[in-house]
Amino acid sequence: MQVDFVIVGGGISGAAAAYFLSQAGRVALIEQEPHFGFHSSGRTAGQFTVGISADQMRAMAAASRAFFQAPPAGFTDLPLIEQRGSLTLGRHSQKAVLDKLHERIGQAGGNAEWVDREQALALFPALLADKFDLGVHETDAQDIDVNTLLQAYLKGAKRNGAVLATNAPVQSIERHEGNWRIRTQDEDYTAGVMVNAAGGWADAIARMAGVAPVGITPYKRTAFTFPLLPGSEGARWPHVCNADYQWYVKPEHGCFMGSPADAQPVSPGEVYPDELDVAQGIYNIEQETALRVPRPISVWAGVRSYVRDRNPVCGARADSPGFIWYAALGGCGVLTSPAMGQAVAALAQGQALPDALRAQGLTPEALSPDRATLAPD
């Protein structure tokens, strides 16, 4: 099958790339699993925040806010975001950490308010007052409806003529006469541009294509759900975590979601929760809140992938034109997908980044897989 762009990886990143690139040409999106969004995209907390440490990732989040607030006409009939708020708590001795968070949120156009103990307890009454002194409340942090977003990207791409293929693991990749040939079990795809949106497998896909890897490391994160308080109390409380990032709790419709905020290096592939990690998360939450988790409703693990500098990788290496990286989203793939999708669409066509992205200080050089911060030690 001859197309203009072939995208490997059908998570939220690949779906966003398909949506934006299908406005410019014929797209094929191929995914190895039985359905799109199978791995990290289907196991995310779905939080929109700009309190992100890595500068380019934070700028991508800031550049994505407008899309979530007012998506293009016809994109979806459902709202993509819902007000939540995000509360980070610490001791007086941790104020320097909170200062940096407060500054980052403000620099990215978010609203960050200092809260004292009494104000924090009013926002999240299950906190234990003797475990913290102050906090930062990102008042315009949001919940993202991940499934609605994913399906809207896919439906939009399909309306534009994109071919969407699941159960299609890549068997080989070759470069021939200026085109990429990607072979799967059922189909061969030929395209002038290939987008590597394979998440934790991105380096493996690059090696298959004869392209140098960028040093992606997948990390496992554990999560679980447990009941809301009687009378569904807690459903509208903010996301909360401590300044040491040893745990977080995110109220959802019908339950709380909790995590030890762990990050364990793993090989790309399916990951499973470890009982000890779940127990550690429950212990950490119960040490600093009045919430009790006698038995989780559900437990799971997901993967987030990083490169050395924790910023996203987007664009082509100088020695491999037509091979476009869209990887290393570090758990921010959902919340940055509008801006990242626009970035990869522009770079795949050899165009400048959109004005809204450049207004956030984003540049092709800072996103490039050739950037100096990815050089090995």
Image (tube, rainbow, N blue to C red):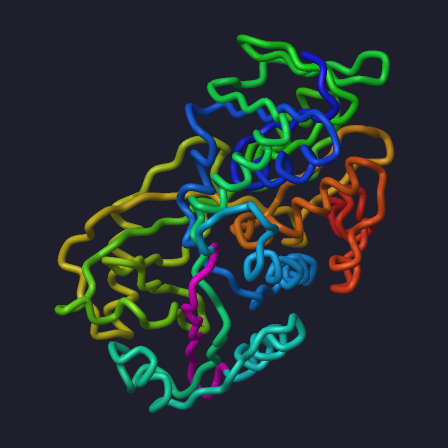
Q: Where is residue 358 in the image (x, y as percent from the top left)?
A: 79, 59
Q: Which of 41 and 203 is in front in this view?
A: 41
Name the quarter where the N terminus is drawn.
Answer: top right
Query: In the figure, 260 relative to 32: above or below?
Result: below
Q: In this view, does 349 lie above or below 279?
A: above
Which of these two is toward me, 235 or 178?
235
Q: Quadrant of residue 106?
A: bottom right
Q: Is 54 covered by the magenta stretch?
A: no
Q: Which residue is drawn at 81% across and 36% down?
A: 349
Q: In the rendered view, does 115 fall on the left or right side of 327? A: left
Q: Where is residue 219 shown, x and y percent of the image?
A: 49, 45
Whether residue 85 is situated above or below residue 8 in the rendered picture: below
Q: Is residue 244 at least partly visible in the picture?
A: yes
Which image quadrant for residue 313? top right
Q: What stretch is highlighted in magenta?
A: 80-94
Number of numbered discs present?
0
Q: Which residue is drawn at 66% across and 32% down?
A: 196
Compared across the picture, whether 42 is left or right of 153 comes to left
In front of the other: 204 or 46: 46
**Residue 148 percent location from the top left of the image:** 44, 46
**Is 110 on the left or on the right of 3, as rendered?**
left
